[in-house]
Amino acid sequence: MHLSPSQQLGARLRHLRKLRGLSGSELARRSGIPQSQLSRIELGKATVTPATLRKMTPHLKLSSSDESELTKMLLEIELDRLAQPPKVKQISLGLTQEGARHLEEVSRFLGASDSNAIHRALAIAHLVLSERATVLVERDGEVERIRFS
């Protein structure tokens, strides 16, 4: 079974915690983080931030090689995350009611098999024609508004 980088880091943190004889709730309490967050990190369901890792490391009594290994794993996760394209959350084209109706007709005609791709292509076409559009982009739960005018 192939583990994601987040799962590998979480498994390593769990291993180190258990090696030090700490329960999850004890490490969470000492680190000042919610126990549920620690559990999600150890399962690879949440990515540990550098700040959270810094809160945990004094209580794990890491060797310099363990600390370097965890830092390298965290850096690889962050580089992978930055390499991922952001998700387009919403595109506002500033269409008239008639334009919106035409957009629906085009979507139906194209089969709307991948509406996100269709909307992106239409947003680009709209930008070329009218030079006005708003795109909401989501990356890691944060939404950024990009306005073209």
Image: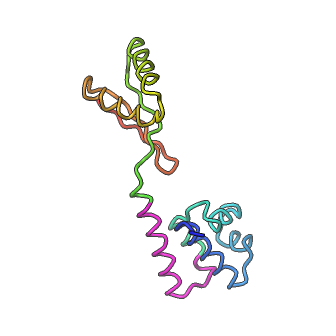
Magenta range = 57-80
Magenta region includes residue 52: no
Residue 18 spot, x, y in % from top left: 70, 81
The chosen color scheme is rainbow
Left or right relative to 110: residue 12? right
Left or right relative to 56: residue 69? left
Residue 7 spot, x, y in % from top left: 58, 68
Quadrant of the image occupied by residue 22: bottom right
Left or right relative to 3: residue 79? left
Residue closest to the eye, 132 or 125: 125
- Image: 93 above or below 9: above
Magenta region includes residue 62: yes
Quadrant of the image occupied by residue 44: bottom right
At 25% from the left edge and 24% from the top edge, which residue is drawn? Answer: 129
Residue closest to the eye, 31 or 93: 93
At 44% from the left edge and 69% from the top edge, which residue is drawn? Answer: 76
At 35% from the left edge and 33% from the top edge, which residue is drawn? Answer: 121
- Dominant SS of magenta comes to helix
- Image: 59 above or below 28: below
The C terminus sits in image quarter? top left
- Image: 60 above or below 139: below
Residue 26 spot, x, y in % from top left: 73, 73
Residue 53 spot, x, y in % from top left: 55, 71
Q: How many marks?
A: 0
Residue closest to the eye, 12 or 60: 12
Quadrant of the image occupied by residue 43: bottom right
The N terminus sits in image quarter? bottom right
